[in-house]
Amino acid sequence: MVKLVTGVAGFIGFSVARSLLEDGEPVVGIDIVNDYYDVTLKETRLRMLEAYPGFTLYRRDLADSGLVGFITERHPDVTEIIHLAAQAGVRYSLINPYAYVQSNIQAHLVMLELARALPGLRNFVYASSSSVYGGNKVSPFSVEHPVTRPISLYAATKRSDELMSYTYSHLFKFPAIGLRFFTVYGPWGRPDMAAFLFTDAILAGRPIEVFNNGEMWRDFTYIDDIVAGIHAAHLRPPPPDADGVRHTVYNLGNHRPEKLMDMIGIIEQTLGRKAEINFRPMQPGDVSSSCADIETSRRDLGFEPRTNISDGLPRFIAWFRDYYQR
Ligand SMILES: NC(=O)c1ccc[n+]([C@@H]2O[C@H](COP(=O)([O-])OP(=O)(O)OC[C@H]3O[C@@H](n4cnc5c(N)ncnc54)[C@H](O)[C@@H]3O)[C@@H](O)[C@H]2O)c1
């Protein structure tokens, strides 16, 4: 019973792998450790994972199809795949689109081929994103809503992952779950995301950039709640749907959109400093608000987010100040 976790040097992959290792589960981790953001942060996360005897790391590109034979030979006992590696970020997909096709589509196909090849696979869980809702105007966003209008290439690759996973689940009869994460934050978080960017800039006395003139709402979801949701999902392969296909998607969000300006207020209060704000227009590819309907996640996974930003942001900031000694 070995769990394969991809993107283990990343924010969510690291957090999930650490929680599994804490429970005494053997984890095989894969990550190419790319330099999309601070590699030192990724290496620190990996050092923490390597302190557990049950952890095996491969620094490999998931887009390489040779990985299928490599893993099936060395680890035929993998029972669950938790595929979290990706090129993340909406804004960067306008700058480097090829990275998204490479890491989110080609690499996703390699992982599906691996799932197909592993003899004892019980569940394939992979990261999708709230961004698949794109131009959806109905809130909260439900997994029942049509998702046919992705407005960034990032969103289009994540939606493609869902479609490819459905097809593989149908053709090769393995269970698969896509998890649509909503703006995840917390300790060990990503340097390209709002909580990190704002904390960093306010402490350095630099102005922060706020888009759509502050008229932005986000369903901020604390990392521990996301880890709990992934944990529940990986142990619950979906039953066959009406067509006999064992593929489904769930929203993992806090189910509580917060106004960006309120979120900035909590950061200011926690740091005891005021932010200097440069208001900017809406960014192409971005959505102005997100809110998860979590009814099916509650029902099937027992998913119950417990942390609101008034508790979660101070915890993130405590980690940030301790880690960076600022
Ligand atoms: N953090 C969020 O708010 C959020 C929201 C929605 C969806 N997601 C999705 O959740 C997953 C995890 O996100 P995260 O925040 O931990 O991102 P992250 O960037 O911190 O982690 C992703 C990791 O994947 C690795 N990677 C990228 N391409 C690779 C490749 N070709 N081969 C091997 N490794 C590769 C990177 O080196 C990185 O360490 C991603 O699929 C992301 O798209 C995240």
Image: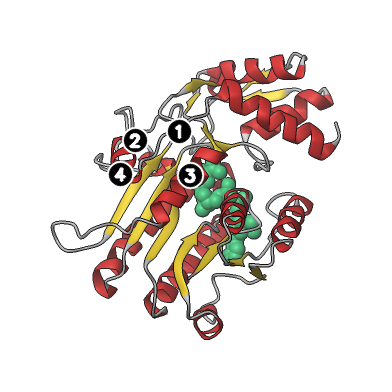
Element under disc 1: loop
Decide which of tag 3 and tag 2 comes sooner along the chain. Answer: 3
Which residue is located at x 29 percent, y 53 percent? 248
Q: Compare marks 2 and 4 and give the one earlier in the sequence.
A: 4
| Numbered disc in front, either 3 or 2 | 3
> Residue 267 appears at what percent x and percent y?
68, 21
For marks 3 and 2, give the CA distance.
14 Å
Q: Which residue is mark 1?
A: 305
> Label 4, on which residue?
147
Q: Earlier in the sequence, mark 3 or mark 4?
A: 4
Q: Is mark 3 within 8 Å of ligand 1?
A: no
Q: Earlier in the sequence, mark 1 or mark 3?
A: 3
Please tell me whether mark 1 or mark 4 is closer to you in this view: 1
User: At x 79% / y 53%, what residue is drawn?
Assistant: 40
The CA distance from mark 1 to mark 4 is 24 Å
Residue position for label 3? 228
- The amino acid at mark 2 is Ile
Alpha carbon separation for disc pair 3 and 4: 25 Å
Name the residue type under label 3.
Ala
**Is residue 104 shown to the viewer in this render?**
yes
**Secondary structure found at label 3:** helix
Q: Quadrant of the C terminus?
A: top right
Q: From the image, tell me which residue sits under label 2.
A: 294
At label 4, the amino acid type is Val
Label at residue 222:
none
